Amino acid sequence: MNRLLIIGAGGVGRVVTSKCAQHPEIFQEITLASRTVAKCDAIATDIKARGGDVRTAQVDADQVPELVRLIEKIKPDLLVNVALPYQDLTIMEACLQTGVHYLDTANYEHPDEARFCYAPQWAMHDRFVEAGLTAVLGCGFDPGVTNVYTAYARKHHFDRMDTVDIVDCNAGDHGYPFATNFNPEINIREVSANGRFFENGQWHETKPLEIHHRFDFPHAIGAKDIYLLYHEEMESLTRHYPEVRRMRFWMTFGQSYLTHLKVLENVGMTRIDPVIYEGKEIVPLQFLRKLLPDPASLGPRTVGKTCIGCWIAGEKDGKPQSYYLYNICDHQESYEETGAQAVSYTTGVPAALSAALVATGQWQGQGVFNIEQFDPDPFMKEIGPWGLPWEETFPPQQTFDETLLPL
Ligand code: NDP
């Protein structure tokens, strides 16, 4: 399985393509396709300058027939979708029609409703089984590495997991008063939605960013405010680990980001329903996206680190066990290697490694899978050498809440 088609030429597409091009022993032919072919060409030129080889193509991934035509021309064995979540279903459909394995980093979301969920992708399971194809969902960092961390923790360090807290910190600084580190539309829809967490078999809803605490991140990152959000990996992890009593997701935000977001919300700029402006229909959030810096342009100016990990409590050999497993990634080092900042890097590297594990047959299966359903060990062995080394501690505190600092 050596022919790869990558769709989406944003920051994440740049990293996936760069990392796969570093492994010609696995991927002998790589094509990067996207809506704007000039972006693919720019990435391919950079990769060529670093000694790699990538072809490019144009495609509108909202159109199944266009996708089918491209796939039939290129004849890939595996397709990596790093366009937007809106394109997940059309791309999966095209893979089914052409007999190609599928992998992505974000679960499906309808453009008109800010609520992502796996249901429409899971509903394609039987069709992937019948076609003898593998689809692996959510192979970025979160979802992605956080799911693998949970699977690895359960396999090696717990007989039972009681609580899982996923903690995502971007301590990077891009120097703009307001910008988002990945697609602004997707990012703002996620952050301005209601929060949700899972406890005692039920989902509990909060107002957007209503619950927040202060957490002391490892290394030089230090104490940061963390906010409870709903995040997509919780949907699959609560399904695959029903023993977990409580699961929450936390993300850090700077005060400037939050103040700007509040103002934009208050004036209606984050609305996703169309409004008529001078006789034309526009969606305010899509218009805002045009005004904000392109996340792919943040690479040269972003400094600092990210720290994303899972803090898990439960039981091992009849005794309470606490485990914190995380990665620290440096924005400038990511940029030097791939031309993209750490948020794109931490998403693109796991997607590239997951593609390698599928391509080499280390992850196999027929149907639609979330990444935690595969053996975490080959991923955990390779993810460090591929660029995202992990660290682990066994904290003395028995619960995540005991680690929180006063606000
Ligand atoms: P960008 O917006 O920077 O890039 C998206 C790319 O997809 C662009 O090249 C865009 O083309 C292309 N695209 C959009 N619509 C179409 C279409 N209809 N047909 C073909 N190409 C299209 O996003 P990012 O690179 O930041 O993110 C990529 C994906 O990664 C997103 O789905 C995001 O949600 C996911 N992600 C996942 C994370 C994780 O940890 N799991 C974290 C961060 C992101 P054009 O240039 O023409 O607009």
Image (cartoon, grey):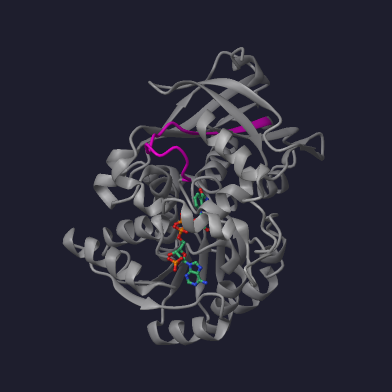
The C terminus, quarter of image: top right
Q: Residue at x 40, y 87 (%)?
A: 73
195 to 359, vertically: above or below: above
| Magenta highlight range | 163-180
Viewer-closest of 282 and 363:
282
Residue 151 can be seen in this image: yes
107 to 36, vertically: above or below: above
Residue 316 can be seen in this image: no
Left-right relation of 75 to 266? left
Question: Residue 389 appears in which quarter of the rendering?
Answer: top left
Viewer-closest of 158 and 89:
89
Q: Residue at x 59, y 14 (%)?
A: 405
The N terminus, quarter of image: bottom left
Q: Position of residue 280 (x, y in %)?
A: 62, 72
Question: Residue 175 appears in which quarter of the rendering?
Answer: top left
Q: Position of residue 253 (x, y in %)?
A: 54, 32
298 to 226, vertically: above or below: below
Q: Position of residue 219 (x, y in %)?
A: 39, 21
359 to 106, vertically: above or below: below
Q: Residue at x 50, y 31 (%)?
A: 325
Viewer-closest of 90 and 110:
110
Q: Position of residue 61 (x, y in %)?
A: 52, 75
Q: Residue at x 57, y 69 (%)?
A: 87
> Most extreme residue toward the front, as rendered?
278
Left-right relation of 155 to 320? left
